[in-house]
Amino acid sequence: MLKYVLKRVLIGFITLFVLGSATFFLMKAVPGSPVNGERYRTEEAQRLAIIRYGLDKPVFEQYTAYLGRLAHGDLGESYIKEGVYVDQTIAMTFPVTARLGGITFVFALLVGITLGTTAALSSKKWVNNLCMFIATIGVSVPSFLLGMFLIIIFGVEVRLLPFVGLRTPANYVLPVIALSLYPISMIARLTRSSMLEVMKQDYIILARSKGTPYKKVVIKHALKNAMLPVVTYAGPAFAFMLTGSFIVETLFSIPGTGREFVSNISNRDYQMIMGLTLFLGALIITFNILTDIISAIVDPRIKLK
């Protein structure tokens, strides 16, 4: 397993290198200058900023300097906000995103597994259809559209729940629902299909023929063995909840990494965009590696090579 982990880490570094390089050259290809705006109102201020950040040098020289800073763990300084560095921004905003993503992840697991198990085991057709209808809605409706709908209905019209920031526990309700519907749908579908297959296995039939209570058969035997596809999906799903909350955080005015990323795109803060892209890419790669390792631990039949 150690050999596999080292191999995946090496591939992860190569992926980050490609991602960082692609982001750098894409930012250079975007029309306009990053040293425009309120901070650089005069031509003299713009000229000094270009010299300070090395933007007057050839692109390849800028690229090698950028890689050199990355090698030393320096993600750079904001072009727009004076004295603000990318790592400082991550340290301030990511805990908010992680807290929202963690709550959403737990909620999505609980609801998705419950829906999938109910759909698989219920003898009533309408229950199965209702669960799968909810799952289909989750796949079909984008999170930002659902978020807008929730704000209009429960925040503006009914005025039942707050929808700005995360000041109280009630503030989490709407963004968690908006962000979790898609993973709930995927987890429910995976759980249902896996449970239907597991319930046909010989060891389940044997356990039931011995008189083992149905509830015990489902929880101890069926559900445990049906969780492998969910575990495999859980890692990328958690990464999605951390990195895919850009629009949701913007909609609900949540001061997280996603909202910061969108704001920097609007402001053309290229240094921030490149740094946050690398950070979020590293998160996704890390969770993918952890998912593979956990899957191998849960199911010994999986061989890591």
Image (cartoon, grey):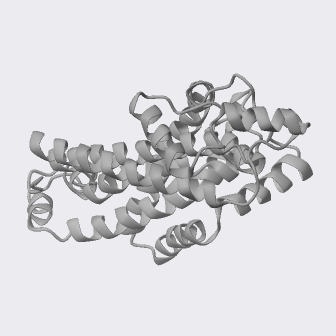
- Image quadrant assignment for residue 95: top right
Can you say which quadrant of the picture contains the N terminus? top left
- Image quadrant assignment for residue 18: bottom left
- As drawn, is 165 to the left or to the right of 183? right
In the figure, 68 relative to 32: above or below? above
- Image quadrant assignment for residue 259: top right
Can you say which quadrant of the picture contains the C terminus? bottom left
For image coordinates 55% across by 27% down, the residue present is 87
Residue 226 is situated, as x and y percent measured from the top left of the image, at 26, 58
Front-most of 74 and 231?
74
For image coordinates 36% across by 56% down, the residue present is 233
For image coordinates 11% across by 39% down, the residue present is 2
Front-most of 2 and 242?
2
Front-most of 49 and 6?
49
Front-most of 200 and 45?
45
Residue 302 is situated, as x and y percent measured from the top left of the image, at 12, 56
Count the numbered circles shown: 0
State whether residue 79 appears in this view.
no
Residue 165 is situated, as x and y percent measured from the top left of the image, at 76, 34
Outermost residue toward the front in this view = 57
In the figure, 222 relative to 216: above or below? below
State whether residue 200 appears in this view.
yes
- As drawn, is 240 to the left or to the right of 89? left
- As drawn, is 96 to the left or to the right of 233? right
Residue 5 is situated, as x and y percent measured from the top left of the image, at 18, 43
- As drawn, is 131 to the left or to the right of 82? left
In the figure, 172 relative to 216: above or below? above
For image coordinates 68% across by 60% down, the residue present is 30
